Every structure is written in C-alpha cells, then in structure tokens.
Amino acid sequence: MTGRVVVTTTRLVVRHLADDDPFAPGPWRDLAVEHRFELRSLGSLGVRVEPEEPTVEVRVVLDEPARGQGYATEALMAVVDHALGERGFARVVAFAPSADERTQHLLERVGLRAVAADGDDLVYLRRAPGTDTNAYAKMPDGS
C-alpha cells in the first residue's frame, strides 16, 4: 500500500494516504490502519489539530473483523504517543458517547481520562509529560 507512514508498531502500520501533513491544523484527516505483515486494511484512525491550540483530537474506527484483537488499542496508543512525543503537542483529546463503554475503555487503556461531559459525550484528555495544566502551551512549530 502507498502513503506516508506515520507510525509503525509490532503488528501495524498507520499511514496517511494524502500528501499533506496529517498533524497540520485543519480538518479531520484519516489515517489508514493496516496489518503490517498481512498487508490488509483494518480500518482508520482520524486526527484533527486545533488551529489555535496545541491539541490533537483523535478517533478510531476498525472494520468489524478487526475488532476485539487489540488493534485499536495498539494503533491509538502509537498515534497518541507520537503526537505527544515526536510531534510535540501538549494535549490529545477524544470524545466517547456516554453509553459506549467499549470506546471509553479503549480511551482509558491508552492513557486518556474523562475530564468533562459535552452533551451525550464524555470528553477524554491526555497531556504530554511535564505539561503545566494551567499554562497555555505553544504549538509545536513555536507559534
């Protein structure tokens, strides 16, 4: 498969199929989640960067046959770690319907914690290590 590799794990490759930077501020960008050795698509992981904040929002949708095998946890953990580590973002956020315990547990497994409610959704957050919770952090490009 083609596209720019964003992260790899033991079993997975997460790649961006477009030419732009998936971590640039703007609209949602879908990343393909693929099995590293079987070269098959498992689903997608979306990322969206806030234009005014050093925050990445994430979501993951796996195809039915790929669910329940740890792929979502593995892909999401790799992308969250990449965003907070190599890419230098201060926060990663995600939303989960308040009735969707499966998604809530997934977000908790990758270190996000419920911090607020937004209508029928729970808001989950993970901060970069050493991030001052009261300070407004800069974008990774220094702006």
Image: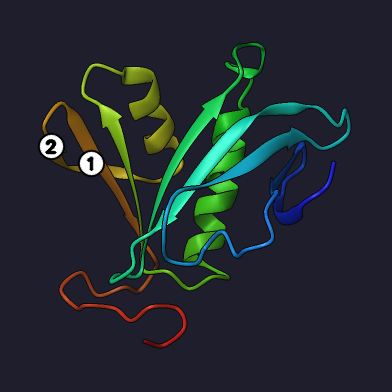
Neighbourhood count class around disc 1 (C-alpha, 10 Å): few under 14, some 14–19, many 20 upward: many
The residue positioned 61% from the left and 38% from the top of the image is: 74
Viewer-nearest residue: 26 or 15: 26
Q: Earlier in the sequence, mark 1 or mark 2?
A: 2
Viewer-nearest residue: 97 or 134: 97
Spatial CA distance of label 1 from label 2 is 6 Å
Q: Secondary structure at mark 2?
A: strand
Q: Position of residue 53 (x, y in %)?
A: 29, 70
Under mark 2, the amino acid is Ala
Instruction: Name above or below for residue 56 compared with residue 71.
Output: below
Q: Which residue is under mark 1?
A: 123
Q: Is residue 122 left or right of residue 73?
A: left
The residue positioned 83% from the left and 47% from the top of the image is: 2
Q: Is residue 129 left or right of residue 34?
A: left
Under mark 1, the amino acid is Val
Task: State the residue lying farthest toward the bottom.
Answer: 142
Q: Is residue 18 left or right of residue 112?
A: right
The N terminus, quarter of image: top right
Location of residue 69 by image quarter: top right
Neighbourhood count class around disc 2 (C-alpha, 10 Å): few under 14, some 14–19, many 20 upward: some
The C terminus, quarter of image: bottom left
Q: Which mark is residue 109?
A: none
Instruction: Name above or below for residue 76 compared with residue 139.
Output: above
The residue positioned 45% from the left and 78% from the top of the image is: 140
Q: Position of residue 80 (x, y in %)?
A: 50, 53
Contact check, label 1 and label 2, Cβ < 8 Å:
yes
Q: Position of residue 125 (x, y in %)?
A: 29, 50
The residue positioned 59% from the left and 49% from the top of the image is: 78
Q: Which residue is under mark 2?
A: 117
